[in-house]
Amino acid sequence: MVRELITREEFALKSISTWNNDWFLLTAGNFQQGKYNSMTISWGSIGVIWGKPFVQVVVRPTRYTHEFIENFPDFTICAFDEEFRRVLNRLGSKSGRDIDKVRHSGLTPISSREVSAPSFDEARLVIECRTMYKAPFDPKNFVSPEIESCYSAKDYHTCYYGEILHIEGKRTLYTS
């Protein structure tokens, strides 16, 4: 896929519909070492904190990707065209502990520009991030009681904030 550099200042995203409807593929680890894992995510945010543009993602500690995002300093999130929806469904429902799900997905992992985690050749949008903050959700801090219903197994997500270092994508979709 042909992608172009998009500066952080010109990057524009329909955040709610993209997270809710399009999903992202989160990948953490090191491409050169061949140690990485990916998972589909639909919860997160993009904004500015501490004067830096960020992506915020959440990962349950029971997910295999959690080991990678905990042990490597960076991650990528990639968005794909609708034709990859079935692939993203599989990547979100199978564990990398059991199979090499990226290899079986048909997607092509490639070196990222600024981080060690891979991105994907087929992605229409690639956002490369360096982790700058992480903390597990604490159920004592849930203000709305219905949030607890998302955690019947008590496997509370860990929240990660990644400083956006590099963005590339289809300019017609992601600039204003």
Image: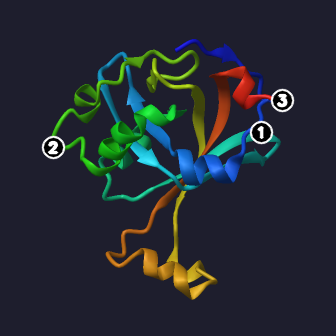
Mark 2 lies on a secondary structure that is: loop
What amino acid is at disc 3? Answer: Glu
C-alpha separation, residue under disc 1 versus residue under disc 3: 11 Å
C-alpha separation, residue under disc 3 versus residue under disc 2: 40 Å
Q: Residue at x 55, y 51 (%)?
A: 21
Does 49 appear above or below 71? below
Residue that badge 3 annotates: 9
Q: Earlier in the sequence, mark 3 or mark 2?
A: 3
Does 11 appear above or below 154? above
Q: Residue 166: x percent and y percent?
A: 66, 24
Residues 50 and 53: in front is 53
Q: Which mark is residue 113?
A: none
Residue that badge 1 annotates: 52
Q: Residue 173: x percent and y percent?
A: 70, 29
Q: Residue at x 77, y 39 (%)?
A: 52
Residue 67 appears anywhere in the view:
yes
What amino acid is at disc 2? Answer: Asp
Does 14 appear above or below 119? below
Q: Residue at x 53, y 78 (%)?
A: 147
What amino acid is at disc 1? Answer: Lys
Residue that badge 2 annotates: 98
